[in-house]
Image (cartoon, rainbow, N blue to C red):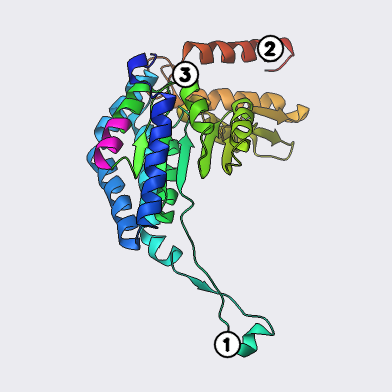
Amino acid sequence: EAMAAAEETTPAELQRLLEVQKAALRERGPPSVRERERRLDVMVQLLLANEDDLVAAVTADFGVRPREVTRFADVLMALEAFKAARAGVRSWCRPERRRVDFPFNVVGATNSVEYQPKGVVGVVAPWNYPIMLLLTPVASAFAAGDAVLLKPSELAPRTALLIARLVNGAYDESIARVVLGGPETSAALAALPLDHLVFTGSTRVGKLVAAACARNLTPTTLELGGKCPVIVGRRADVTACAKRVVHGKILNSGQTCLAPDYVFVEESVRDAFVEAFERTIADMFPHGVLGSGDYASIISAAHGDRLRALVAEAKSAGCR
């Protein structure tokens, strides 16, 4: 379901928000530790108070997704990031003394490192874990004293709209703002002179993001899609291997950056591995996958078509 055009954040509004946040940092200076703790506490309470609504929004965006998966992999993991930052922020902000070398040490010089906020941090998040991957970078940014501009995925529009309502209602725009839209909005955000940008997504789009950020020398953190092969040798416990591969692939229907993508199996144990794999699936879903409610939907028709094409290609190459 596409996001309505009226809900999309314009490039002009993105520029305005950036200027508001940068101006606030210049005028107020780095936020105090107490203020950073307050910002973290607000997000903890936001997640706890709206957990059911967040789970329902993600479920609606996927069509079918086990509620337990969303609670654990999205809400709980985001919550733990903010709790960890809340516990550590006071010590993280503390200046660190450094050794003074000769000749300055003999004249009473001192040396220390004081950690300062970067400024405005942008976050462009994907759809597969639309809460956790959008909000966990915010925990570090708030602990560091940064302001944030957050762009959730348009492929999870209900979740994006809910997070925008919650975050934008809880924080002043000089501290945090969720912006909405499609790829054009993400590109416009990446093109701004941010102080840091966090992007999670495909390698192809990551290259575009890096190129856009390079124009302003914006530092980036890029968590890009990769391949996760499994190698099974003849001395392996094929039953245990099959179970582990299935569990890794079943979570969110394999729509996870760490999910195993393919398996290289030594010829002598190939059939045993395939049998163990099929047996594990049958044990997990005795009445079949469809309609079980425990197997997440593929996020969109386009993604489903791509997966079917990959399966067809693999079969034509002799894979099982």
Q: Label for residue 298?
A: 3
* Disc 2 residue type (three-letter): Glu
* Disc 1 residue type (three-letter): Gly
22 w.r.t. 256: above or below: below
* Residue 263 magenta: no
Q: Nearer the viewer, residue 55 or 91?
A: 91
Magenta stretch mostly in which secondary structure? helix
Q: Nearer the viewer, residue 292 or 42?
A: 42
Q: Quadrant of residue 71?
A: top left
Kindly tell me whether residue 307 is visible in this rendering: yes
Could you tell me residue 279's position as x and y percent?
54, 25
* Residue 166 magenta: yes
Q: Secondary structure at mark 2?
A: helix
Spatial separation of the CA atoms under disc 2 and disc 3? 19 Å
* Disc 3 residue type (three-letter): Ile
Spatial separation of the CA atoms under disc 3 and disc 1? 65 Å
**In the visual, does 168 lie left or right of 3?**
left
Q: Magenta residues, as a range?
A: 164-171
Q: Which quarter shows the N terminus?
A: top left
Observer-side mark, 3 or 1, equals 1
Q: Nearer the viewer, residue 303 or 85?
A: 85
32 w.r.t. 253: above or below: below
Question: Label 1 near label 2: C-beta < 8 Å?
Answer: no
Q: Residue furthest right?
A: 267
Q: Label for residue 108?
A: 1
